[in-house]
Image (tube, rainbow, N blue to C red):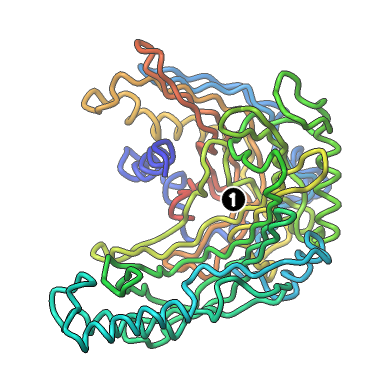
Amino acid sequence: MKKSIIILIALLLLCACQPTPESPIVVGKDQNAMIEQAKREIPEEQRTMSVRERLGVPEKLAYSYHKGNLTIEADAEIVVPDGELPIVRAFPTDFDQETVTDLWNALIGDIPMTAIVYKRAKPEIEQTIEKLLAAIDGGKYADYGFASEEKAKDALKALQIMYREAPDDVAGDPADSTLRKGVFLDDDGKEVASHTYLYAESQKTGYRFSVSNNASNTVPIVTVSYDEMGRPVGTAVREVDRRAGFTFIKNNEPQAPCFIWGDELSFSDPCPTGIPGTVTVTPQRAKEYAETFLKDAKLDGAYAVRRVFVITDSDATEFAYRIVCTHTVGGCPALMTGNTGEAENAEAYFNDDENDDYAEIWEYEQFWIDVNDSGVYCVQMQQPLAIGDVVTERSNLLSFSEIRKIMEKMLPIVYDTEANDPNSENSDMRYTKRINRVELGLWRVREQNRIDRGLLIPVWAFYASTTESYPEIGYSWQTYLPILLVNAIDGSIIDPQKGY
């Protein structure tokens, strides 16, 4: 994970170690108490007001802070949903067969596809077993790099276990939308976990369609990994995590290598100029392509198009649009958790045992649709959520003036330590954070010490570009992240890594 995310997480964790400005700002982690606070009656005279009116939210946020190496500025639009903000239960889920079939029909249709196999096939492993058996019988196991007959027999056992779970043919058979079952074996060949998946491609069209659902293990599985002769070469770990994922891409499109996030656009903007490439459609047309896909895939009831970014390839010779979609609940949107500076997701994990090397992981839901002139050419859905019962349809929220006070207290506390620590190895680095969007929406928090259930709750997200630079040598880099997440109900700070 890149340095900027590590710094963000480390600094958010430091909040509890700083002088506490007001205990509700830092503590406030009791979910039952938070729910009761959310359910408090809204004064009668405010019930007909919009959320913006009731909370006293201005159209823009202006703010400036400077101390030493740290500058924080805001000239930001403040986005508030039209309807009320609920609290709903949320759970990690898999891509079920019906959803996969709908995605297949919307993206693949009748195009012939072939199953992708990532393992060695049974005939190849069988030939290796025969060679090793002959070598052991003839005392020539050293020819294959084994120091003793015992080591060769251990390798033979490993190959026999590989053979049991190997496919018959790595060439792949014709594929349709049917999910397949994969198993995970321990070092004794016993099945210890399973999952469902689908990997398919068409070399003719360049289409690739992949689904990988969550594994069933409830504890980490550590196994020895082997080379093609069955020699141990390291260990492999099947962690306890929730990382179901779906990816579709047309690899023959010129924009297929575009993965670097660029500027955010408005859907009313014209097509960007001054960027090489072949895309000529406007952001609005790209939005229409994405919305048509959502409808065709029967996802339009659960997700909505939210934001649009430019993406480019590593050489900046092509560009495309990345449409970010998020869950909606009763018309209220979830916030964007991904960011334009990182390829990976922010993680929410916990590890109660300090001696445990493998933390349990529940990453945030991500949903991106990449669009060029021909329409949708890439779709990524990661860590999907299942929405459960509604805890409250209308949450009693803190006023924006209270949220602003919390922001003004917490931003210096969170970022001063790193920026102005004379003992830091980065003591000459300048940090400039420009808040350009403040948004009220739903953010997934998990129950403490659990990765199988949580809540979507109202949260204020302060999104900012962060430039870290060494002025004397002219070196700088930039990321785009929510630099502060404030619970809109009780004012507590959400730690994006812990997930609450």
Q: Position of residue 229 (x, y in %)?
A: 31, 73
**Along the viewing direction, whichever of 318 and 156 lies nearer the viewer:** 156
Residue shown at 49%/27% (left/top)? Answer: 478
290 is higher (above) or lower (below) than 384:
above
Q: Does 306 appear above or below 123?
A: above
Find disc 1 in the rendering and name its residue. 489
The residue sitting at the top extreme is: 472
Q: Position of residue 189 (x, y in %)?
A: 37, 86
Residue at x 58%, y 61% (from the top left corner): 383
Q: Is residue 57 left or right of residue 413?
A: right
Q: Is 292 left or right of 473, judged from the image as shown?
A: right
Residues 135 and 52: in front is 135
Q: Residues within 10 Å of mark 1 (few under 14, many from 20)?
A: many
Q: Secondary structure at mark 1?
A: loop
> Where, quadrant-wise, is the N terminus in this rendering?
top left
Quadrant assignment, res 277: top right
